[in-house]
Image (cartoon, coloured by chain):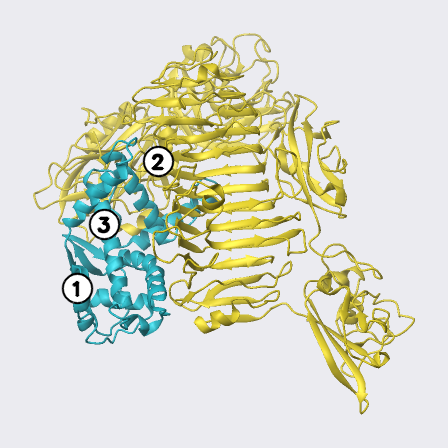
Chain colours: A cyan, B yellow
Amino acid sequence: MKPFIMRIVAFLFLSATVSAAVDPNTVVAHFGDVPIYAEEVTFHIRDQVALVAVHFKTRHQADLSGDNWLQYYEDEVPLELLMERSLESCRRSKAIQVLALKHELAEQLPFPGFGNVCEQINAARAKGRTEGRVLYGPLAYSPAQLYKYKLTNMQNHLKTFLADVESQGRDALQEETIQEQMMNMPVTLEKQTLNQLIAEQVGASTSLRSDLGEP
Amino acid sequence: MLKKNGKPFIFVLLSWLLACGSLQAAVTISTDNDSAFDSLPNIAVRVGTTAEGGYSQKTSLNMAQTISPDEYVSIDAVNLVYSSASAATLTLHIFEVADPQSGGIAVPGTTLVTETFEVPASGAENLLSIALDSPLELDAGTGYAIYLDTSDASASGIFEWRRSSGAGDFYAGGSFYQDGSIKMVSGGTRDALLALSGAIAPVAITVGDDSTFDTLSNAVLRVGTTVDGAFSQAATSNMAQTVSPTVPSEVDAIHLVYEAASEATVTLHIFEVADPEAEPISIPGTTLLSETFEVPASSGTDLLSIALATSLSLNTGAHYAVYFDTSDLSATGNFKWRRSGSAVGDFYAGGAFYQDDVLKVDARDALLVLSGAEQAPPAPPVWTSNPLPVTDGVVSQNYHGDLNDHASDPDFDPITFTKVPGSFSGPGSDWLTIATDGTLSGSPSSSDIGVSSWTVKADDGVTGADTTTLYITVGLPTTAGAPTNGTALSGLASYEQFVSDYMLEGADADRDADPDGDGVPNSSEYIWLMNPTLADAEPVVLSDSGHLLAPGIPAFEVDTESDEVSYLTALRNDDPYLQYDVQFLTNLVDGVPVVVDSVSREHASRNSGMIKAVESTDDVEHLFVELSVTENTTGTVYHIDNQADFNTYKSFTFSPGDQILFKRGAIFSGMFAPQGSGIPGRPIVIGNYGTGPMPIINALGDSVSAIHLYNVEHWEVHNIEVTNTDGSDDHQGKLKGIYIETDDDRPEAVMDHIYIKNCYVHDVNGTTLDSDPDIAKRHGGIHVHTYGDRDTMINDLQIVGNTIEKTGGVGLGFDSSFVSVATGNTNYLWTGVYVAHNFINDTDRNNMIIRMSVNALAEYNVLANSSRANKGHSLFNFHTVGFTAQHNEAYGNVGYDGADRGGFDADYNARDTTYQYNYSHDNMWCIGLMKRWNKGVAVRYNISQNDQHGFCFFGFNSATECEDVQIYNNIYYAGPHITDAQLIAENRTPHNTDFINNIFYFENGGYFGSGVGAGVNTDFSHNAYFGIPAWGSDPSPVTDDPLLSAPGTGAYKIDMSDPERLWGYCLQAGSPCINAGATIAGVTRDFWGNPVPADSGTDIGPHEVQP
């Protein structure tokens, strides 16, 4: 039996239509009652594209480009796997954010508008530099770098909060808590939009096969 | 003291009470889009500059932001960003507070401003501007609250005040309050977005009791000490007192005894005079200060104090006039300046008192006190860094440098530079000359290849001298030597330089011109190293095509025995943009030359020597060699669009200037291992084109790397994403993402110019648990190695702006088999190594290892979650000389083994290592210090926050080859959740180590570590201890609360995107750490970039409080 997320994907491809590029501030899913914006999911898609391509190259000798992402390779479709991994990765990140927020370890990441915030931060840092102030870290962050920077700090603070640092089990304890939180965040999707977003990221057509994703 | 319009406070209060007598608000409300907040004009006090923070809680909570201006300001409007669903009624209170960061706040009975008004509903997020009906003056250093009482807001009138993005972002003087308590947001505080419009007041006037004149504090210049003298003449006489400082001073206020029957307008001028007793005296066109202000009427005789907004520097040896222009006085506005009752010169002989621009006839000095601070005493010169960042030397080339670029004298005395006799150390002889004016010169030879060092002294001839070590690395030139039968121009040549050298002007400078009329155009004269202004004895023969022909040109020699042609012996080979196309022809077919071979080379240095021309030519005397030389500055652009293109070019030999552009959005499999090298000024560049995400190269875990630059130089890689994994979590071999490698197959000793920038390197290998360094520490994300038996080095290596994560092994690492600093084999240390702005996260071993280099610099890197599979410090250096790591952040290095998990590590086999201005948090340790061969380590001005085990970890505990370790002006902070933190790791023994000026701050107690007492030649001095007893032998400990601004506020809130996020470790006024530290030579700035020292002494910890 395919996991839940894959069944969702199967439905997605049936209903996708051609439209303009997805606005990064568009809600593409909910994890529980937490809205997920295209901009945040895109960070995870970008991290997974290469690994999905590796999977299909090593297992099926497939070179993925364009609509190859929509083809079946035996029982697998690259875009399905990309969506599954991206959403799972994103849900994990969001679970960390929710837990960090719950324990007042961090502020909520500013979605929608993360990219704008990044621009403002970079502008402030550039101004600081011209004024001779001391800056730390890269002089300008890419949105993906800033997202990872904030997320890794959140996760570390969560670790410290959850467990004694001496314990080898601190990662395990954290993982258990994150998994529990993820279970409390069922996935609902804005199907057409999410489908289009992922297709855009790999240069695939959004005019889709009707049988894609069928078990 | 707070005043309005320069009037005493009582008048201000009265006027406000009168204004409040009606319901008509004495303020004017206007709104605008909140995007205008950042660009509001005339802002005297600003809290926050972006509108990105959250809002304060909704409903009718009262809110306040406290401030403490650092200058006198006069404000006329209060601006804030708000949101309100409907109109709301608010009351604004402004009042003084004793402590702008105290835990609670309440509206006092008497305020400076109390106004009730209605705020309109906001469209979305609006800027609210509240204009005051009359200006309000705020004193520097006094706390004030801007308080909004929202208790009258209707249920629907929800009013929200927006907060700034981070605490202390732009204003560290106060706090944001909600319902009387400091607002805490997810573990930290926030400032409100607040801007007070107005202006910085040039002067502030206060009036006091004249009997205090004799006891005024901080008087740096005093004229007279009694108040029994007569007054100057009444009415409108201008008056002046001249002074001649005996010590250099910073004056911030002027005090005099005066009498005025009514309010008077006067203008104060301060200016320099040549002779303090010459007359007449008059106001020059340019003054140091000219300000007009109102002086209130006196109550009989009063003390008038004029505080300056900006202090004035007065120097010894100069003379100044303090001059009051009273020409604006009304008939009733008499203003009198009291003279001293003592004889002239009793207290001050340097000047005189003037009235109406001439010396007062009954010569007396005026009563005058200039208060402020004496400037720091004369100080010796200081070096700006150690070691000095000078340029490298090149064999057989003149060396140029200037030590004045690296030293300064606080008193601006001229500096004399000398080389300390006998201090030279290096592989060859002492080739460098240091002139007393700081000029460096000399010409190193091949025996000097490597690193030479000298101790150099900077002496101002007055207050003493300071020494530092000068390292110069000598390498081989990157191009071949000068041609044998021509005169090479200095350095790399260009046609423009040729024109300049021969003073060709106008049309004579054209490439086709032939100013000497010998039939050879300038372009050929240039190529053949001829003189374009002197006709050649034997004109060069040109072919029909204009190419130079070999016959008759001595540069070509045909060896009839071997059928080989020697060429290019007389051609310019110092212009990297010249491309040589050589054709070998015979005339055996119907008298028409036939091409039998051709060679194209892009740089003469590649072509010198013998070329096999025609292997089976029977009649070699008929061989022609035709040469054309063209300038090639662009190279070829190769587009890699798909896997077929990738396969075609993955091992192709590229030429200088070529660009290999991968299509964005495309994915490629395999290893890209191109060949060929660029040349100086024309690197070969790997990049991308088109739109969409970065192109990806997946090496699939079965190649050494995704990009492999092997025995090549002058290459750059930009904006490429790479992986090297089969997708499993298994260890898959000695894999890298991007690999730069050179070995014995490479003929040149120097590998020049390798840049890796803005690449995304991730998922390299699976999990690498192996502790074998060859497997675990020499593979991973981006690695650069010089291996083999023949000495090789790398010059000009930049790894900048990359993201590296999820790698087996080390994120970023260097290695060489040609260097051993400990044994003195330093000739092939890499030079020009710069590693910056990289984000490295989640690596099985270290995030970064810098090896085998001299004066390498690693800065602005983020090092996160290092050593996930095995221990190791996040960043360490090894076999280096003069390595510096600064402005880096390291966090998350924790795991099953507490040892060797510091943010940073001065590892062994190293000399003159500096870790400064770094931030380590949430690691096991802040800094590792290895006790094997390790000489000269400075760990200074770093901040360590919540590094779980403690501050220092000394490695190789039984070793003793650790010398000259200086650990100073750092702070180690352990928050309340950390128990049993150790200053130095348990059972580890420091060696030849000094701990000076550090702050050790344990919220929940801690201890030194049992090995500290056995430390060898280990001293503690001038450290501050909080939550831990002072070390017994520390002769100057500080044990009171160091009064940090907000220690630990960053514990869960650190945001490196916030330029001032670590303000909580700044010292508050009154801290016992201020000026309590030892002065350490060579320190110029603190963690935040402030000058050190700022005043008479050095502060303890990473913050130097500025006056």
Q: Secondary structure at mark 3?
A: helix
**Residue B444 in view, yes or no:** no
User: Mark 1 = which residue?
Assistant: A8
Q: Secondary structure at mark 2?
A: loop
Q: Quadrant of residue A3?
A: bottom left
> How would you rate the neighbour count of disc 1 (Cα within 10 Å): few for under 14, some for 14-19, many for 20 or more?
some
Pinpoint the chain carrying mark 2. B
Q: Amino acid at mark 2?
A: Val
Pinpoint the chain carrying mark 3. A
User: Mark 2 = which residue?
Assistant: B894
User: Mark 3 = which residue?
Assistant: A94
N-terminal of the pair, mark 3 or mark 1, is 1
Q: Quadrant of residue B746?
A: bottom right
Total labels: the figure holds 3
In percent of width and height, residue B480 lies at 74, 57
What residue sits 81% from the left and 79% below the top?
A: B624
In percent of width and height, residue A16 lies at 20, 72
Q: Find the residue positioned furthest to the bottom.
A: B590
Q: Are marks 3 and 1 on the same chain?
A: yes
